[in-house]
């Protein structure tokens, strides 16, 4: 059962104390147990439009060198999911080997989950902040959205798939030339609780300089 929107605390205004360091067993547990859901396990209901707005506002609170805001969100919910899928199908319809079953699948891309948020990496011109840092910030947005969704009571997964790497698809989804898709975060209500999977062995990936 998702928490009510009123449970999300207000973010501080500029120069107000952020009180960012706060012991929280719940936050630690959320991170210790975090798991993505499979698309097929994202059931209705979707987060409402108001919940999605609140989630992206939380997600946008990422480290952002130079305050450039080098990312943006495109919410794909409700019937827009079919429209966005149709736009993708249109992109590939004349490609070699594409048959009706492939087109049908692609048309349903965003209908596989109750809602989707496309996170667009939109690097800003900057002499000070390298593009790489700006792209990392967009990645942080994707993860922050996932964590915020979990804390509100929704499940999700961060996918890219072919359409994140196809310039024709990017154009069809409304991206500008300098932009790239950082991810599609699909969201819904978990129908199955995900079991843990094999993790990279951190001990072999930590050293001390
Ligand atoms: C940038 C990025 C893109 C991803 N794209 C895909 C994808 O296209 N398809 C997929 O099955 N998993 C993809 N994943 C992996 C899933 O998001 C997820 O992390 C994985 O299924 C493992 O689950 P976990 O998050 O619970 O560890 C991607 C992850 C990242 C960070």
Image: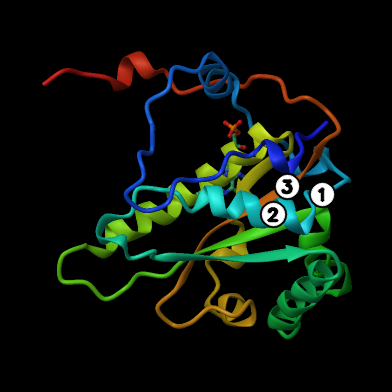
Name the residue rendered at 51%, 43% in the picture: 144
Here the colouring is rainbow
Determine whether the residue tagged by mark 2 lies in a helix, strand or loop: helix
User: How far apart are the two marked residues, 1 and 3, measured between alpha carbons?
Assistant: 7 Å
Q: Residues within 10 Å of mark 3 (few under 14, many from 20)?
A: many
- The answer to whether marks 1 and 3 mark residues whose Cβ atoms lie closer than 8 Å is yes
Name the residue rendered at 76%, 38% in the picture: 4
Q: Is mark 1 within 8 Å of ligand 1?
A: no
Determine whether the residue tagged by mark 3 lies in a helix, strand or loop: strand
Label of residue 187 in the image: 3
Q: Which residue is mark 2?
A: 52
User: How far apart are the two marked residues, 1 and 2, measured between alpha carbons?
Assistant: 9 Å
- The answer to whether marks 2 and 3 mark residues whose Cβ atoms lie closer than 8 Å is yes
In which image quadrant can residue 77 be found? bottom right
Q: Quadrant of the N terminus?
A: top right
Q: Which residue is mark 1?
A: 46
Classify the position of ligand 1 by quadrant: top left, top right, bottom left or bottom right. Answer: top right
20 versus 116 height, above or below:
above
Name the residue rendered at 78%, 35% in the picture: 2
Front of the two marks 1 and 2: 2
User: How far apart are the two marked residues, 2 and 3, measured between alpha carbons?
Assistant: 9 Å
Q: Position of residue 49 (x, y in %)?
A: 76, 59
């Amino acid at each position: 059962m998702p928490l009510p929107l009123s449970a999300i605390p207000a973010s501080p205004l500029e120069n107000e104390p952020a009180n960012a360091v706060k012991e929280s067993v719940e936050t630690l547990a959320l991170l210790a147990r975090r798991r993505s859901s499979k698309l097929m396990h994202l059931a209705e209901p979707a987060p409402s439009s108001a919940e999605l707005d609140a989630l992206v506002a939380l997600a946008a609170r990422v480290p952002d060198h130079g305050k450039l805001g080098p990312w943006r969100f495109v919410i794909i919910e409700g019937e827009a999911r079919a429209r966005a899928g149709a736009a993708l199908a249109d992109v590939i319809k004349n490609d070699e080997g594409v048959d009706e079953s492939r087109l049908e699948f692609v048309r349903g891309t965003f209908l596989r989950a109750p809602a989707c948020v496309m996170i667009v990496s939109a690097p800003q011109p900057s002499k000070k902040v390298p593009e790489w840092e700006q792209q990392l910030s967009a990645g942080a947005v994707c993860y922050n959205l996932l964590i915020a969704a979990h804390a509100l009571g929704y499940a999700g997964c961060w996918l890219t798939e072919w359409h994140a790497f196809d310039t024709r698809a990017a154009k069809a989804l409304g991206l500008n030339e300098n932009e790239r898709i950082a991810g599609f975060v699909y969201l819904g209500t978990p129908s199955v609780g995900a079991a843990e999977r094999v993790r990279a062995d951190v001990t072999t990936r930590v050293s001390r300089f």
